[in-house]
Image (cartoon, rainbow, N blue to C red):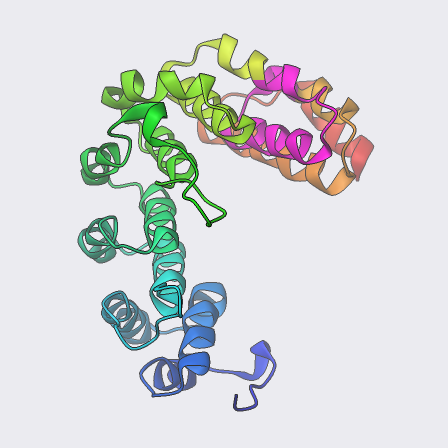
Amino acid sequence: MAAVSAAPSLTVPEMLKQLQGEDHSLRYYAAWWLGKFGLESATTAERQSMVTALIAALADESDRTELGGYPLRRNAARALGKLGDPQAVPPLIACLGCDDFYVREAAAIALGQLGDAAAVEPLKTLLAGGVAMATRVPGRPHLAQPVEAVIESLGQLGGTSAIPLIEPFLEHDLPRVQFAAARALFQLTAAPAYGDRLIAALASEDVQLRRTALLDLGAMGYLPATTAIVEARVEASFKLIALHGILAKQLTTRVAPAEPLFAALDQLL
């Protein structure tokens, strides 16, 4: 692999050239870099070039693993979600039919980030078959479909028509899938029972599950979870991320943040 300079010294034109080159590892890195740093210095014309090049990378056939995965497509999908351009919605929807699980997962996440309701119906198709479909693929570390990412994006997109499809996943074998369902159902219904379910999960003996539940509470902006988040047995960095998520939600809805939220942030800073 050719040497790559530190991220701050690179430029958008350089990374676009790498993305359209022949070295698979450099193309993979360029797609990641454009999603991570591209918007910081890109001109309007460069932003359009970034989106165009990354959309083209979604159809790449050359960078493929021995197991049939498409690494470049995965990074391109992730980058497009971060760049926020609606032009990426149709090609990302097309990626939901890719035979690479991780491309489908990255596309589902990106569609949630882009916020276009046109993605709701295509995302729902990945939940067809319900919980019975969402089982592990033999020999692989993932389920048949990226249901966790799909459910979370449906919650972000306000896909209320998906509620009947999401509800059964509250009983899925994997707690993190249950958490995703609770998070999305709260976003779609505002029913406190779903937020309270995640608060209860903060008592889990598994620290990773505690972290996941805590971050979900932050992502859904569940204000009643403030005290439970502060008292949770997880690292302070996770608590800060969750509390900032709640604060952002309060500001977005133009509701004055509760005093205990500011006190909690002060306590951790």
Which residue is farthest bottom? Answer: 2
Residue at 77% x, 38% y: name it.
236
Residue 221's place in the image compared with 26, above or below, is: above
Q: Is residue 226 magenta?
A: no
Viewed as shown, does residue 85 lie left or right of 143?
left
Image coords of residue 7 (percent x, y) = 57, 77
Quadrant position of residue 20: bottom left
Establish if 171 lies above or below 268: above
Q: Is residue 218 magenta?
A: yes
Q: Quadrant of residue 5?
A: bottom right
Looking at this view, is 142 or 193 the one in front?
142
State the residue in front, 113 or 41.
113
Q: Main secondary structure of the magenta part?
A: helix
Asked whether residue 254 appears in the rendered view, the answer is no
Magenta part of the chain: 198-225
Give residue 9's position: percent from left, percent from top.
57, 83
- Above/below status of 127 relative to 53: above
Give the x, y percent position of residue 37. Answer: 49, 68
Q: Tell me if 167 is positioned left or right of 41 in this view.
A: left
Coordinates of residue 202 in the picture (x, y in percent) = 68, 22
